[in-house]
Amino acid sequence: MQNFPLTVKAREDFPLLKRKIHGHPLAYLDNAATTQKPNCVIDALVRFYENHNSNVSRGVYTLAEEATEIYEEGRESVAKFIGANDSGKIIFTRGTTESINLVAAAWAQPKLKTDERILVTEMEHHSNLVPWQMVAQKAGAELVYWPITPETGSSDGGRLDLQKLDELLADSVKRKRSFRLLAVSAVSNVLGTVNPIAEIIELAHARGVPVLVDAAQAVARMPIDVSGWDCDFLAFSGHKIYGPTGIGVLYAKNERLEEMLPFQGGGGMIRQVGRQTSTWADAPQKFEAGTPPVAEVSGLAAAIKYLRNFGMQEIQRHEYELTTHALKRFAEFEDLELYGPPETIERCGVVSFNLRNVHPHDVAQVLDESGIAVRAGHHCTQVLHKRFGIAASVRMSFGLYNEIPEIDRLFSALDQAREIFLK
Ligand SMILES: Cc1ncc(COP(=O)(O)O)c(C=O)c1O
Protein backbone atom coordinates (compact mmCIF):
# COMPACT_ATOMS: atom_id res chain seq x y z
CA MET A 1 0.00 0.00 0.00
CA GLN A 2 1.61 3.19 -1.21
CA ASN A 3 0.83 5.49 1.69
CA PHE A 4 1.16 2.92 4.40
CA PRO A 5 4.70 2.23 5.47
CA LEU A 6 3.01 1.60 8.81
CA THR A 7 1.27 -1.60 7.66
CA VAL A 8 4.28 -3.07 5.92
CA LYS A 9 6.40 -2.54 8.99
CA ALA A 10 3.73 -3.60 11.47
CA ARG A 11 2.90 -6.92 9.82
CA GLU A 12 6.40 -8.24 10.47
CA ASP A 13 5.97 -7.61 14.17
CA PHE A 14 3.00 -9.97 14.59
CA PRO A 15 3.94 -13.66 14.48
CA LEU A 16 0.34 -14.85 14.37
CA LEU A 17 -0.29 -13.03 11.09
CA LYS A 18 2.04 -15.51 9.39
CA ARG A 19 -0.53 -18.28 9.89
CA LYS A 20 -2.44 -19.81 7.03
CA ILE A 21 -6.10 -20.68 7.53
CA HIS A 22 -7.58 -23.33 5.23
CA GLY A 23 -4.56 -22.82 3.00
CA HIS A 24 -5.04 -19.03 2.71
CA PRO A 25 -3.05 -16.25 4.32
CA LEU A 26 -4.91 -15.06 7.41
CA ALA A 27 -6.83 -11.80 6.96
CA TYR A 28 -7.57 -10.92 10.57
CA LEU A 29 -10.50 -8.50 10.53
CA ASP A 30 -11.82 -9.02 14.05
CA ASN A 31 -9.80 -6.39 15.86
CA ALA A 32 -12.80 -4.93 17.67
CA ALA A 33 -13.06 -8.26 19.53
CA THR A 34 -9.36 -8.49 20.29
CA THR A 35 -6.10 -7.53 18.62
CA GLN A 36 -3.10 -9.69 17.79
CA LYS A 37 0.09 -9.23 19.82
CA PRO A 38 3.39 -7.88 18.53
CA ASN A 39 6.68 -9.55 19.45
CA CYS A 40 7.55 -6.77 21.88
CA VAL A 41 4.45 -7.58 23.99
CA ILE A 42 5.11 -11.32 23.91
CA ASP A 43 8.77 -10.64 24.81
CA ALA A 44 7.77 -8.40 27.72
CA LEU A 45 5.68 -11.22 29.22
CA VAL A 46 8.48 -13.76 28.78
CA ARG A 47 11.08 -11.30 30.13
CA PHE A 48 8.99 -10.69 33.23
CA TYR A 49 8.60 -14.38 34.04
CA GLU A 50 12.21 -15.23 33.16
CA ASN A 51 13.84 -12.37 35.04
CA HIS A 52 11.63 -10.46 37.44
CA ASN A 53 8.74 -12.66 38.59
CA SER A 54 7.78 -11.77 42.14
CA ASN A 55 4.82 -10.25 43.95
CA VAL A 56 4.60 -6.46 44.20
CA SER A 57 4.76 -4.11 47.19
CA ARG A 58 5.32 -7.00 49.58
CA GLY A 59 9.03 -7.63 49.71
CA VAL A 60 12.24 -5.71 50.17
CA TYR A 61 14.35 -8.10 48.14
CA THR A 62 15.62 -7.24 44.67
CA LEU A 63 13.06 -9.20 42.63
CA ALA A 64 10.12 -7.77 44.57
CA GLU A 65 11.46 -4.27 44.11
CA GLU A 66 11.92 -4.86 40.38
CA ALA A 67 8.38 -6.23 40.00
CA THR A 68 6.97 -3.25 41.91
CA GLU A 69 8.92 -0.88 39.69
CA ILE A 70 7.62 -2.57 36.53
CA TYR A 71 4.07 -2.39 37.84
CA GLU A 72 4.24 1.28 38.84
CA GLU A 73 6.08 2.26 35.65
CA GLY A 74 3.22 0.60 33.76
CA ARG A 75 0.82 2.86 35.63
CA GLU A 76 2.88 5.90 34.60
CA SER A 77 2.90 4.90 30.95
CA VAL A 78 -0.90 4.37 30.93
CA ALA A 79 -1.38 7.79 32.55
CA LYS A 80 0.74 9.51 29.89
CA PHE A 81 -0.94 7.55 27.08
CA ILE A 82 -4.43 8.78 27.96
CA GLY A 83 -3.42 12.29 29.03
CA ALA A 84 -3.86 11.85 32.80
CA ASN A 85 -1.67 14.21 34.79
CA ASP A 86 -1.23 11.84 37.71
CA SER A 87 -0.71 8.06 37.69
CA GLY A 88 -2.56 7.88 41.02
CA LYS A 89 -5.77 8.19 39.00
CA ILE A 90 -5.06 4.92 37.15
CA ILE A 91 -6.59 1.77 38.62
CA PHE A 92 -5.68 -1.60 37.12
CA THR A 93 -8.55 -4.02 36.59
CA ARG A 94 -9.15 -7.14 34.48
CA GLY A 95 -10.68 -5.18 31.60
CA THR A 96 -13.27 -2.63 30.53
CA THR A 97 -16.07 -4.77 31.94
CA GLU A 98 -14.52 -4.93 35.39
CA SER A 99 -13.67 -1.21 35.30
CA ILE A 100 -17.30 -0.30 34.63
CA ASN A 101 -18.55 -2.75 37.26
CA LEU A 102 -16.12 -1.15 39.70
CA VAL A 103 -17.67 2.29 39.12
CA ALA A 104 -21.16 0.81 39.32
CA ALA A 105 -20.51 -0.97 42.64
CA ALA A 106 -18.10 1.41 44.36
CA TRP A 107 -19.45 4.78 43.23
CA ALA A 108 -22.94 4.60 41.71
CA GLN A 109 -24.61 2.01 43.93
CA PRO A 110 -23.99 3.74 47.27
CA LYS A 111 -25.16 7.09 45.87
CA LEU A 112 -28.07 6.20 43.64
CA LYS A 113 -31.52 7.24 44.89
CA THR A 114 -34.94 6.00 43.78
CA ASP A 115 -35.86 9.26 42.07
CA GLU A 116 -32.58 9.41 40.13
CA ARG A 117 -31.75 8.12 36.69
CA ILE A 118 -28.79 6.86 34.68
CA LEU A 119 -28.40 7.94 31.09
CA VAL A 120 -27.00 5.49 28.53
CA THR A 121 -27.12 5.36 24.74
CA GLU A 122 -28.71 2.84 22.40
CA MET A 123 -25.30 1.96 20.98
CA GLU A 124 -23.71 0.76 24.25
CA HIS A 125 -21.97 -2.59 24.60
CA HIS A 126 -23.57 -4.86 27.22
CA SER A 127 -20.60 -4.05 29.48
CA ASN A 128 -21.80 -0.46 29.61
CA LEU A 129 -25.48 -1.37 30.00
CA VAL A 130 -25.92 -4.40 32.23
CA PRO A 131 -23.97 -3.00 35.24
CA TRP A 132 -26.21 0.11 35.08
CA GLN A 133 -29.35 -2.02 34.84
CA MET A 134 -28.18 -3.90 37.92
CA VAL A 135 -27.55 -0.82 40.05
CA ALA A 136 -30.71 0.90 38.80
CA GLN A 137 -32.82 -2.15 39.68
CA LYS A 138 -31.32 -2.37 43.17
CA ALA A 139 -31.98 1.31 43.86
CA GLY A 140 -35.38 1.37 42.12
CA ALA A 141 -33.91 4.00 39.79
CA GLU A 142 -34.53 4.35 36.07
CA LEU A 143 -32.28 3.73 33.06
CA VAL A 144 -32.91 6.26 30.28
CA TYR A 145 -31.76 5.78 26.66
CA TRP A 146 -30.32 8.55 24.53
CA PRO A 147 -31.51 7.30 21.10
CA ILE A 148 -29.30 7.18 18.03
CA THR A 149 -30.35 9.06 14.91
CA PRO A 150 -32.48 6.97 12.52
CA GLU A 151 -30.70 4.75 10.04
CA THR A 152 -32.19 6.09 6.84
CA GLY A 153 -29.11 5.74 4.68
CA SER A 154 -28.32 9.40 5.29
CA SER A 155 -24.91 10.37 6.55
CA ASP A 156 -26.52 11.36 9.84
CA GLY A 157 -27.81 7.86 10.65
CA GLY A 158 -26.42 5.87 13.57
CA ARG A 159 -25.07 8.87 15.43
CA LEU A 160 -25.69 10.61 18.74
CA ASP A 161 -27.44 13.95 18.39
CA LEU A 162 -26.21 16.62 20.82
CA GLN A 163 -29.47 18.54 20.55
CA LYS A 164 -31.28 15.46 21.83
CA LEU A 165 -28.85 15.18 24.74
CA ASP A 166 -29.53 18.79 25.63
CA GLU A 167 -33.28 18.08 25.61
CA LEU A 168 -32.89 15.00 27.81
CA LEU A 169 -30.74 16.90 30.29
CA ALA A 170 -33.11 19.91 30.35
CA ASP A 171 -36.11 17.61 30.80
CA SER A 172 -34.48 15.91 33.78
CA VAL A 173 -33.94 19.29 35.46
CA LYS A 174 -37.56 20.28 34.77
CA ARG A 175 -38.90 17.02 36.17
CA LYS A 176 -36.49 17.12 39.12
CA ARG A 177 -35.28 13.60 38.27
CA SER A 178 -31.59 14.14 37.93
CA PHE A 179 -29.14 11.92 36.12
CA ARG A 180 -26.57 10.43 38.48
CA LEU A 181 -24.36 9.55 35.50
CA LEU A 182 -24.09 9.53 31.73
CA ALA A 183 -22.35 6.35 30.51
CA VAL A 184 -21.33 6.59 26.86
CA SER A 185 -18.88 4.90 24.52
CA ALA A 186 -16.32 6.99 22.64
CA VAL A 187 -16.62 4.68 19.63
CA SER A 188 -19.41 2.21 18.85
CA ASN A 189 -18.19 -1.39 18.57
CA VAL A 190 -20.81 -2.05 15.87
CA LEU A 191 -21.46 1.17 13.97
CA GLY A 192 -17.92 2.52 14.15
CA THR A 193 -19.42 5.90 15.02
CA VAL A 194 -16.94 8.21 16.72
CA ASN A 195 -18.91 10.14 19.31
CA PRO A 196 -18.16 13.81 20.06
CA ILE A 197 -16.96 13.03 23.57
CA ALA A 198 -15.61 16.48 24.46
CA GLU A 199 -18.91 18.16 23.53
CA ILE A 200 -20.96 15.45 25.26
CA ILE A 201 -18.99 15.90 28.48
CA GLU A 202 -19.28 19.68 28.31
CA LEU A 203 -23.07 19.50 27.93
CA ALA A 204 -23.45 16.93 30.73
CA HIS A 205 -21.17 18.85 33.09
CA ALA A 206 -23.09 22.06 32.42
CA ARG A 207 -26.07 20.27 34.05
CA GLY A 208 -23.93 18.75 36.80
CA VAL A 209 -23.97 15.20 35.39
CA PRO A 210 -20.74 13.16 35.68
CA VAL A 211 -19.67 11.15 32.60
CA LEU A 212 -18.16 7.68 32.24
CA VAL A 213 -16.47 7.07 28.90
CA ASP A 214 -16.24 3.51 27.61
CA ALA A 215 -13.07 3.79 25.54
CA ALA A 216 -12.73 0.04 24.79
CA GLN A 217 -12.80 0.67 21.03
CA ALA A 218 -11.48 4.23 20.93
CA VAL A 219 -8.21 3.69 22.71
CA ALA A 220 -6.56 1.66 19.92
CA ARG A 221 -7.90 3.95 17.22
CA MET A 222 -7.30 7.59 18.20
CA PRO A 223 -5.56 9.83 20.72
CA ILE A 224 -7.29 9.94 24.12
CA ASP A 225 -7.14 12.97 26.37
CA VAL A 226 -8.88 12.46 29.71
CA SER A 227 -7.65 15.80 31.08
CA GLY A 228 -8.73 17.79 28.01
CA TRP A 229 -12.08 16.01 27.98
CA ASP A 230 -12.42 16.38 31.75
CA CYS A 231 -14.19 13.00 31.93
CA ASP A 232 -15.07 11.64 35.34
CA PHE A 233 -14.29 8.02 34.50
CA LEU A 234 -12.75 6.24 31.52
CA ALA A 235 -12.44 2.49 30.99
CA PHE A 236 -10.51 0.33 28.54
CA SER A 237 -8.97 -3.13 28.06
CA GLY A 238 -5.33 -4.01 27.33
CA HIS A 239 -6.18 -6.79 24.86
CA LYS A 240 -7.85 -4.38 22.45
CA ILE A 241 -4.70 -2.26 22.13
CA TYR A 242 -2.32 -5.10 21.17
CA GLY A 243 -1.61 -5.87 24.84
CA PRO A 244 -2.34 -9.00 26.91
CA THR A 245 -5.72 -10.23 28.08
CA GLY A 246 -6.59 -9.98 31.77
CA ILE A 247 -5.53 -6.36 32.17
CA GLY A 248 -7.73 -3.29 32.04
CA VAL A 249 -7.73 0.30 33.18
CA LEU A 250 -10.08 2.56 35.04
CA TYR A 251 -9.22 6.25 35.08
CA ALA A 252 -11.11 8.34 37.65
CA LYS A 253 -10.61 11.99 38.41
CA ASN A 254 -9.70 12.99 41.98
CA GLU A 255 -13.15 14.17 43.00
CA ARG A 256 -14.63 10.79 42.00
CA LEU A 257 -11.80 8.76 43.53
CA GLU A 258 -12.52 10.42 46.85
CA GLU A 259 -16.20 9.49 46.59
CA MET A 260 -15.57 5.84 45.74
CA LEU A 261 -15.90 3.11 48.36
CA PRO A 262 -13.69 0.01 48.08
CA PHE A 263 -14.72 -2.47 45.39
CA GLN A 264 -13.32 -5.77 46.66
CA GLY A 265 -11.78 -6.47 50.07
CA GLY A 266 -8.46 -8.25 50.55
CA GLY A 267 -4.71 -7.80 50.67
CA GLY A 268 -3.10 -4.73 49.20
CA MET A 269 -6.13 -2.43 49.57
CA ILE A 270 -5.96 -1.91 53.34
CA ARG A 271 -4.12 0.39 55.72
CA GLN A 272 -4.97 -1.38 58.99
CA VAL A 273 -7.00 -4.49 59.68
CA GLY A 274 -8.65 -4.96 63.06
CA ARG A 275 -10.75 -7.88 64.23
CA GLN A 276 -14.04 -6.24 63.26
CA THR A 277 -13.18 -3.41 60.90
CA SER A 278 -10.43 -2.15 58.61
CA THR A 279 -9.20 1.08 57.14
CA TRP A 280 -8.30 1.56 53.49
CA ALA A 281 -5.14 2.36 51.60
CA ASP A 282 -5.16 5.46 49.42
CA ALA A 283 -6.23 5.27 45.78
CA PRO A 284 -5.36 3.58 43.49
CA GLN A 285 -4.33 0.67 45.80
CA LYS A 286 -7.68 1.00 47.63
CA PHE A 287 -9.31 -0.45 44.51
CA GLU A 288 -6.75 -3.15 43.72
CA ALA A 289 -7.37 -5.99 46.17
CA GLY A 290 -5.19 -9.12 45.90
CA THR A 291 -2.14 -9.90 43.80
CA PRO A 292 -2.26 -7.66 40.75
CA PRO A 293 -1.56 -8.73 37.13
CA VAL A 294 2.10 -7.62 37.09
CA ALA A 295 3.21 -9.52 33.97
CA GLU A 296 0.14 -8.24 32.12
CA VAL A 297 0.97 -4.68 33.11
CA SER A 298 4.48 -5.12 31.70
CA GLY A 299 2.87 -6.39 28.46
CA LEU A 300 0.45 -3.46 28.40
CA ALA A 301 3.30 -0.99 28.85
CA ALA A 302 5.12 -2.63 25.91
CA ALA A 303 1.97 -2.32 23.76
CA ILE A 304 1.63 1.36 24.64
CA LYS A 305 5.27 1.99 23.76
CA TYR A 306 4.69 0.18 20.45
CA LEU A 307 1.65 2.33 19.63
CA ARG A 308 3.42 5.54 20.62
CA ASN A 309 6.25 4.70 18.21
CA PHE A 310 3.75 4.75 15.34
CA GLY A 311 1.78 7.67 16.79
CA MET A 312 -1.94 7.46 17.44
CA GLN A 313 -2.69 10.06 14.78
CA GLU A 314 -0.88 7.94 12.19
CA ILE A 315 -2.87 4.88 13.26
CA GLN A 316 -6.08 6.91 13.05
CA ARG A 317 -5.19 8.02 9.52
CA HIS A 318 -4.43 4.45 8.53
CA GLU A 319 -7.83 3.23 9.75
CA TYR A 320 -9.51 6.15 8.06
CA GLU A 321 -8.06 5.07 4.70
CA LEU A 322 -9.09 1.45 5.22
CA THR A 323 -12.60 2.47 6.27
CA THR A 324 -12.98 4.83 3.33
CA HIS A 325 -12.05 1.98 1.01
CA ALA A 326 -14.47 -0.45 2.68
CA LEU A 327 -17.35 2.04 2.53
CA LYS A 328 -16.64 2.70 -1.16
CA ARG A 329 -16.82 -1.03 -1.84
CA PHE A 330 -20.15 -1.30 0.02
CA ALA A 331 -21.67 1.24 -2.34
CA GLU A 332 -21.09 -1.25 -5.21
CA PHE A 333 -23.47 -3.89 -3.83
CA GLU A 334 -27.21 -3.53 -3.46
CA ASP A 335 -27.59 -6.72 -1.45
CA LEU A 336 -25.30 -5.54 1.37
CA GLU A 337 -26.95 -3.71 4.25
CA LEU A 338 -24.53 -1.43 6.01
CA TYR A 339 -25.18 -0.30 9.58
CA GLY A 340 -23.91 3.01 10.85
CA PRO A 341 -22.83 6.14 9.01
CA PRO A 342 -22.13 5.42 5.31
CA GLU A 343 -19.42 8.09 5.22
CA THR A 344 -16.03 8.20 6.88
CA ILE A 345 -16.71 11.46 8.73
CA GLU A 346 -16.75 10.77 12.46
CA ARG A 347 -16.37 7.08 11.79
CA CYS A 348 -13.58 4.60 12.32
CA GLY A 349 -12.51 1.10 11.35
CA VAL A 350 -15.45 -0.93 12.61
CA VAL A 351 -17.94 -1.80 9.87
CA SER A 352 -21.02 -4.01 10.37
CA PHE A 353 -23.28 -5.31 7.65
CA ASN A 354 -25.56 -8.11 6.47
CA LEU A 355 -25.76 -9.92 3.16
CA ARG A 356 -29.49 -9.86 2.47
CA ASN A 357 -31.23 -13.22 3.04
CA VAL A 358 -28.09 -14.95 4.33
CA HIS A 359 -27.55 -15.57 8.02
CA PRO A 360 -24.50 -13.68 9.35
CA HIS A 361 -23.06 -16.89 10.83
CA ASP A 362 -23.18 -18.51 7.39
CA VAL A 363 -21.42 -15.49 5.90
CA ALA A 364 -18.69 -15.61 8.55
CA GLN A 365 -18.20 -19.35 8.01
CA VAL A 366 -17.80 -18.94 4.25
CA LEU A 367 -15.32 -16.09 4.81
CA ASP A 368 -13.34 -18.31 7.18
CA GLU A 369 -12.97 -20.87 4.38
CA SER A 370 -11.01 -18.14 2.57
CA GLY A 371 -8.89 -17.35 5.63
CA ILE A 372 -10.85 -14.20 6.54
CA ALA A 373 -11.67 -13.78 10.23
CA VAL A 374 -14.73 -11.64 10.94
CA ARG A 375 -17.25 -11.69 13.75
CA ALA A 376 -20.92 -12.64 13.38
CA GLY A 377 -23.56 -12.17 16.06
CA HIS A 378 -24.98 -9.33 18.11
CA HIS A 379 -21.52 -8.18 19.25
CA CYS A 380 -22.89 -7.69 22.80
CA THR A 381 -25.25 -4.98 21.59
CA GLN A 382 -28.71 -6.56 21.57
CA VAL A 383 -30.45 -3.25 22.26
CA LEU A 384 -28.80 -1.72 19.20
CA HIS A 385 -29.53 -4.72 16.97
CA LYS A 386 -33.19 -4.70 18.04
CA ARG A 387 -33.27 -1.00 17.18
CA PHE A 388 -32.37 -2.02 13.61
CA GLY A 389 -34.89 -4.87 13.68
CA ILE A 390 -32.20 -7.53 13.29
CA ALA A 391 -30.81 -10.25 15.56
CA ALA A 392 -27.24 -10.29 14.28
CA SER A 393 -24.76 -8.84 11.82
CA VAL A 394 -21.33 -9.48 10.33
CA ARG A 395 -18.57 -7.17 11.54
CA MET A 396 -15.18 -6.43 10.03
CA SER A 397 -12.87 -4.32 12.16
CA PHE A 398 -9.40 -3.10 11.33
CA GLY A 399 -6.09 -2.91 13.11
CA LEU A 400 -2.82 -1.23 12.29
CA TYR A 401 -1.62 -4.30 10.33
CA ASN A 402 -4.58 -4.56 7.95
CA GLU A 403 -4.31 -3.60 4.31
CA ILE A 404 -6.64 -2.81 1.45
CA PRO A 405 -6.18 -6.15 -0.40
CA GLU A 406 -7.55 -7.94 2.68
CA ILE A 407 -10.74 -5.90 2.43
CA ASP A 408 -10.98 -6.69 -1.27
CA ARG A 409 -10.55 -10.39 -0.50
CA LEU A 410 -13.56 -10.14 1.81
CA PHE A 411 -15.75 -8.61 -0.89
CA SER A 412 -14.65 -11.32 -3.37
CA ALA A 413 -15.34 -14.08 -0.85
CA LEU A 414 -18.88 -12.74 -0.36
CA ASP A 415 -19.55 -13.99 -3.89
CA GLN A 416 -19.04 -17.53 -2.61
CA ALA A 417 -21.69 -16.91 0.04
CA ARG A 418 -24.05 -15.64 -2.67
CA GLU A 419 -23.25 -18.72 -4.75
CA ILE A 420 -23.89 -21.17 -1.91
CA PHE A 421 -26.92 -19.59 -0.24
CA LEU A 422 -28.72 -17.55 -2.88
CA LYS A 423 -28.47 -19.53 -6.11
C1 LIG B 1 -17.39 -0.71 23.39
C2 LIG B 1 -17.01 -1.87 24.26
N1 LIG B 1 -17.17 -1.79 25.58
C3 LIG B 1 -16.82 -2.78 26.41
C4 LIG B 1 -16.28 -3.94 25.93
C5 LIG B 1 -15.89 -5.03 26.89
O1 LIG B 1 -14.50 -5.22 26.90
P1 LIG B 1 -13.88 -6.43 27.73
O2 LIG B 1 -14.59 -7.67 27.28
O3 LIG B 1 -12.44 -6.42 27.34
O4 LIG B 1 -14.10 -6.15 29.17
C6 LIG B 1 -16.09 -4.10 24.56
C7 LIG B 1 -15.58 -5.36 23.99
O5 LIG B 1 -15.83 -5.71 22.87
C8 LIG B 1 -16.46 -3.03 23.68
O6 LIG B 1 -16.30 -3.11 22.37
Image (cartoon, rainbow, N blue to C red):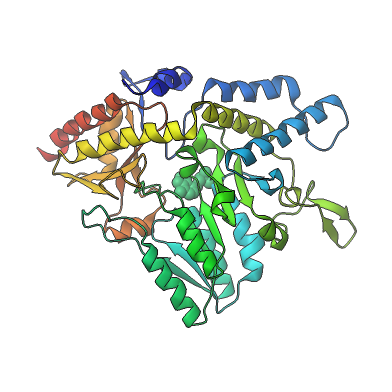
Residue 173: x %, y % from top left:
50, 78
**Residue at x 16%, y 34% (from the top left corner):** 420
Q: Is residue 181 visible?
A: no
**Residue at x 62%, y 31% (from the top left corner):** 301
Outermost residue toward the bottom? Answer: 175
Image position of 325 with respect to 117: above or below: above
Residue 320: x %, y % from top left:
35, 36
Q: Quadrant of the N terminus?
A: top left
Q: Nearer the viewer, residue 62 or 19?
A: 62
Q: Nearer the viewer, residue 297 or 320?
A: 320
Residue 219: x %, y % from top left:
50, 41
Outermost residue toward the right? Answer: 274
**Residue at x 74%, y 40% (from the top left corner):** 291
Q: Quadrant of residue 350?
A: top left
Q: Quadrant of the C terminus?
A: top left
Image position of 152 with respect to 329: above or below: below
Give the left or right position of residue 67, taking residue 253 as reference. Answer: right
Q: Quadrant of residue 331?
A: top left
Give the left or right position of residue 341, taking residue 222 as reference. Answer: left
Give the left or right position of residue 29, taking residue 203 as reference. Answer: left
Q: Is residue 139 visible?
A: yes
Residue 372: x %, y % from top left:
31, 29
Outermost residue toward the left? Answer: 423
- Number of callouts in the render? 0
Q: Nearer the viewer, residue 124 or 274?
A: 124
Image position of 342 with respect to 208: above or below: above
**Residue at x 63%, y 55% (from the top left corner):** 102
